[in-house]
C-alpha cells in the first residue's frame, strides 16, 4: 500500500507522481524501443497498428472521455488525415510537413463538424457527427481527381530530407516517436487549464460557464484537437497500409474507434492504448477460437461483428470503467489485500442537479 | 462608490408567467444582503438574471457601474461575480482539488501550444494556482477531502466544496443560493462563521438567498423579502421580520392556523 507524502505543489503537477511510475514507464519505453529485436515481423506490424490506433484513440478519448461530446463519425478525420498525407507524400513533401498539414486540415474539418456541438447535446450530437462521417466518406469517394475515388490510392514510404523509412523497423520507430509526442502533448494538456475546462464541460456546463469557461471556444477546441490527433493517426495509417480506399473510413471504422475508447475505459489516457490493444488483439483471438466452435457459428459471416457487439454490451453492463478500470480494481485488490471491498469503486449517484437553465 | 450591484425595475417573463416583476434593490460594498421569501418567489430567478443565464424583459442590472445586459454568462466570473447553486452543481467525476483548480480558470491566460509543451511559465502558473487553491482549502478546512472524488462525498461536504469553488474564483460579489439548506444545526453554525469571515477577513460582498431565519438574522446587514416575483419589504433583518406583509406571506405566527379554518374567523 503506497502512501504518498507530499511536501511540494510540484508533486501534484508532475506527470510521474512517484518512483513506481518512473520505474514502470521507463521499463515500458525500453521494451518499446527494443521491440524490433524481441518481436518478429508480424508482431511488430501489430504493435505499429496499436500505436497508430492509440493515437487516434487519444483524440477520441479527449473528445468523448474528457469533454463528454459523443462523436460517431470519427473515422472521417482518420480519412482526411490519411488522404492528405497520401496526396502530399505523393507530391514529394517531406514527412514532418505533410504530417503537420494532415493534422491541420483534420483540425479544420473537426472545427466544422463541431459546430453542431454548440447547439445540440448527447445522442443528437452523435447523430450529427454520424451524418458528417457519411458526408466525408462520400466526398473522399467522389473527389476522384485528388483521392482516386473508389479505385483507391497507393501510398509510398515515409521520407524526409533524404531519409526513407524503407523497412518496417524504421517505420515502427517513426510511429513510436509520433505516438510518444502525441501522448505527452495530451497529458500536458490534461494537467493544464484547458484540460480542466474540458472536464468541466463534461460534468456540468452550467457550472463551467459560471467559472468563466467559454463553452463554444472549448467545445470547438476539443473537436479540433481530437480531429488533429485522428488526422495524425490517419497519416501513419496511410503509410502502414500502403493502399487507401474510401470504405476503410466508413461507419464500421467509426464504430470500431468508439468501441476502442469505451472498452479501454472512458476518461483515461491508458484507456486509449488498452482499447487499441483490444482492437488489434480481438480479431486474432477470434481467428484462433473459430476452429473450436461448431461450424454453424464459427464460419458465419458477421461473427466478428457479433462478438464485438457482445463484448461492448458486456463491458457497458458489468465494467463501465473499461479495461483500465478493471486493471485499477485488480491492482487495488492486490495493494489492499485482504481489505479490498466490492464497493470501493462504486460512485454515488449524483444528487439532483439544479434545474436545467438552458 | 459604495454601490456594488444595482437592480432597477427588473422584470422577467416566461411566456405568460411574470417570474420577477419590478424588483429594485442595491447591494452595497462589503455588506451581506439576503433575499428571503417563499418558494417560487423569484429569488433564484434574480440570481440567474445576475449570472446572465436569463435576460430581463425589462429593467436593468449594473455591477460596479457597468451594465450587465449583453454580457455573456461566461464573462460574469471575470467581472468578479461568483455563485453557488441551490442543488449542487459540482464536477462530479473530478476530485475536490480539481474542482477548485477549475475555479481559478479566469486567472489563466490562453496558451494552447505552451500548455501542450508545458513551458516553465505554464508550470509556474500552475504552482501559483495550486497555492491560491490551498489558501481556500485552508480557509474552509477541506484538507481531508483534497483527493476525494466529489461523487463519493456526503452532502454537507459538497456544499462546502461548492462554496470553496466560488471563493477560488477570487470574486468581489459572492452569490450564495441557500447555503444552509440540508445542513444540520452545527453545520449551519459553521456556515454562519464562514459567511462572517468572508465578509470581514476577505472583504467580499455577499448576496444570498436563505430560508433559515436564525442564520439570516445572525449574518445579514440588510434583507429583501420577495413574494410572487415582487418586492414585499426591504430593511434590516428585524425590520423585515416585523413587517406584517412578510409575516402573512412567509413567516407565520405561533398560533397561525388560518389555513386550517373551515369558515372565516
Image: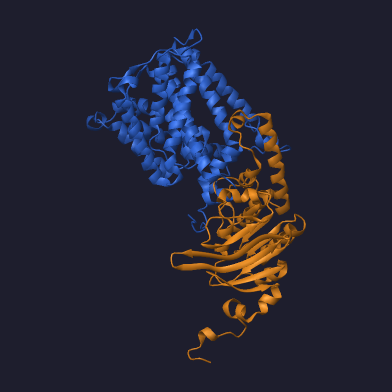
Chain colours: A blue, B orange
Query: Where is residue B124 drawn, in percent x and y?
Result: 70, 34
Query: Where is residue B251 drawn, in percent x and y?
Result: 61, 77
B43 or A184, which is in the foreground?
B43
Image vertical order of residue B111 relative to residue B265, above or below: above
Res. A106 visible in picture: yes
Residue closest to the far left: A296
Left or right side of A297 for A231: right
Choose top left, top right, bottom left or bottom right for residue A241: top left
Residue closest to the far top: A162
Image vertical order of residue B236 relative to residue A122, above or below: below
A190 or B236, which is in the foreground?
B236
Q: Please report the residue visible at 62 percent of the width from the left and 72 percent of the height from the top.
A: B225
What is the total number of numbered labels drawn onto the structure image?
A: 0
Res. A232 visible in picture: no
Query: Where is residue A206 drawn, in percent x and y?
Result: 53, 51
Left or right side of A247 for B118: right
Image vertical order of residue A86 relative to residue B117, above or below: above
Q: Quadrant of the N terminus of chain A?
A: top right
Query: Where is residue A277 drawn, in percent x and y?
Result: 44, 28
Choose top left, top right, bottom left or bottom right for residue B187: bottom right
B205 or A271, which is in the foreground?
B205
Amino acid at each position: 500500500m503506497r502512501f504518498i507524502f507530499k511536501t511540494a505543489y510540484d508533486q501534484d503537477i508532475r506527470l510521474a507522481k512517484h518512483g513506481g511510475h518512473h520505474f514502470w514507464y521507463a521499463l515500458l519505453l525500453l521494451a518499446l524501443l527494443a521491440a524490433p529485436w524481441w518481436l518478429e515481423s508480424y508482431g511488430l506490424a501489430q504493435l505499429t497498428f496499436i500505436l497508430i490506433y492509440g493515437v487516434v484513440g487519444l483524440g477520441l478519448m479527449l473528445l468523448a472521455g474528457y469533454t463528454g461530446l459523443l462523436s460517431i463519425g470519427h473515422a472521417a478525420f482518420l480519412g482526411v488525415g490519411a488522404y492528405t498525407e497520401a496526396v502530399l507524400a505523393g507530391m514529394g513533401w517531406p514527412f514532418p510537413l505533410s504530417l503537420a498539414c494532415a493534422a491541420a486540415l483534420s483540425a479544420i474539418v473537426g472545427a466544422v463538424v463541431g459546430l453542431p456541438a454548440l447547439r445540440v447535446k448527447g445522442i443528437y450530437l452523435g447523430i450529427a457527427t454520424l451524418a458528417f462521417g457519411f458526408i466525408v466518406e462520400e466526398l473522399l469517394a467522389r473527389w476522384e481527381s485528388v483521392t482516386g475515388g473508389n479505385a483507391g490510392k497507393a501510398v509510398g514510404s515515409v521520407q524526409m530530407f533524404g531519409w526513407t523509412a524503407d523497412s518496417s523497423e524504421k517505420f515502427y520507430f517513426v510511429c513510436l516517436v509520433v505516438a510518444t509526442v502525441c501522448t505527452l502533448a495530451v497529458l500536458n494538456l490534461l494537467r493544464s487549464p484547458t484540460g480542466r475546462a474540458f472536464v468541466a464541460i463534461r460534468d456540468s456546463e452550467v457550472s463551467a460557464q459560471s467559472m468563466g469557461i467559454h463553452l463554444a471556444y472549448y467545445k470547438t477546441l476539443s473537436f479540433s484537437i481530437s480531429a488533429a490527433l485522428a488526422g495524425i493517426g490517419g497519416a501513419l495509417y496511410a503509410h502502414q497500409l500502403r493502399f487507401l480506399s474510401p470504405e476503410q473510413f466508413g461507419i464500421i471504422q467509426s464504430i470500431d474507434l468508439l468501441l476502442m475508447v469505451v472498452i479501454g475505459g472512458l476518461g483515461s489516457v491508458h484507456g486509449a492504448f488498452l482499447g487499441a490493444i483490444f482492437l488489434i488483439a480481438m480479431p486474432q483471438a477470434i481467428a484462433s477460437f473459430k476452429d473450436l466452435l461448431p461450424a454453424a457459428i464459427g464460419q458465419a459471416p458477421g461473427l466478428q461483428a457479433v462478438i464485438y457487439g457482445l463484448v461492448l454490451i458486456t463491458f457497458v453492463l458489468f465494467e463501465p470503467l473499461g479495461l483500465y478500470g478493471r486493471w485499477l480494481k485488480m491492482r487495488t485488490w492486490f495493494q489492499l489485500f485482504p481489505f479490498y471491498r466490492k464497493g470501493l469503486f462504486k460512485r454515488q449517484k449524483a444528487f439532483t442537479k439544479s434545474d436545467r437553465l438552458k | 462608490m459604495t454601490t456594488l450591484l444595482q437592480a432597477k425595475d427588473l422584470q422577467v417573463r416566461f411566456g405568460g408567467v411574470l417570474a420577477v416583476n419590478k424588483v429594485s434593490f442595491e447591494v452595497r460594498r462589503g455588506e451581506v444582503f439576503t433575499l428571503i421569501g417563499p418558494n417560487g418567489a423569484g429569488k433564484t430567478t434574480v440570481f440567474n438574471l445576475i449570472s446572465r443565464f436569463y435576460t430581463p424583459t425589462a429593467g436593468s442590472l449594473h455591477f460596479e457601474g457597468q451594465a450587465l445586459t449583453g454580457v455573456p454568462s461566461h464573462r460574469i466570473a471575470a467581472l468578479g461575480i461568483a455563485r453557488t447553486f441551490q442543488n449542487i452543481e459540482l464536477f462530479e467525476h473530478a476530485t475536490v482539488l480539481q474542482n477548485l483548480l477549475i475555479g481559478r480558470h479566469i486567472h489563466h491566460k490562453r496558451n494552447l501550444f505552451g500548455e501542450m509543451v508545458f513551458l516553465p511559465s505554464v508550470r509556474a502558473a500552475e504552482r501559483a494556482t495550486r497555492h491560491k487553491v490551498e489558501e481556500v482549502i485552508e480557509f474552509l478546512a477541506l484538507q481531508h477531502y483534497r483527493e476525494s472524488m466529489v461523487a463519493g462525498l456526503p452532502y454537507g461536504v459538497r456544499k462546502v466544496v461548492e462554496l470553496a469553488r466560488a471563493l477560488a474564483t477570487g470574486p468581489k460579489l459572492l452569490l450564495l443560493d441557500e447555503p444552509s439548506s440540508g445542513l444540520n444545526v452545527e453545520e449551519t453554525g459553521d456556515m454562519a462563521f464562514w459567511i462572517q469571515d468572508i465578509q470581514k477577513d476577505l472583504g467580499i460582498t455577499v448576496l444570498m438567498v436563505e430560508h433559515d431565519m436564525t442564520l439570516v438574522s445572525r449574518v445579514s446587514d440588510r434583507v429583501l423579502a420577495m413574494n410572487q416575483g415582487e418586492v414585499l419589504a426591504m430593511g434590516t433583518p428585524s425590520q423585515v421580520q416585523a413587517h406584517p406583509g412578510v409575516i402573512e406571506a412567509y413567516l407565520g405566527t405561533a398560533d397561525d392556523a388560518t389555513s386550517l379554518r373551515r369558515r372565516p374567523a
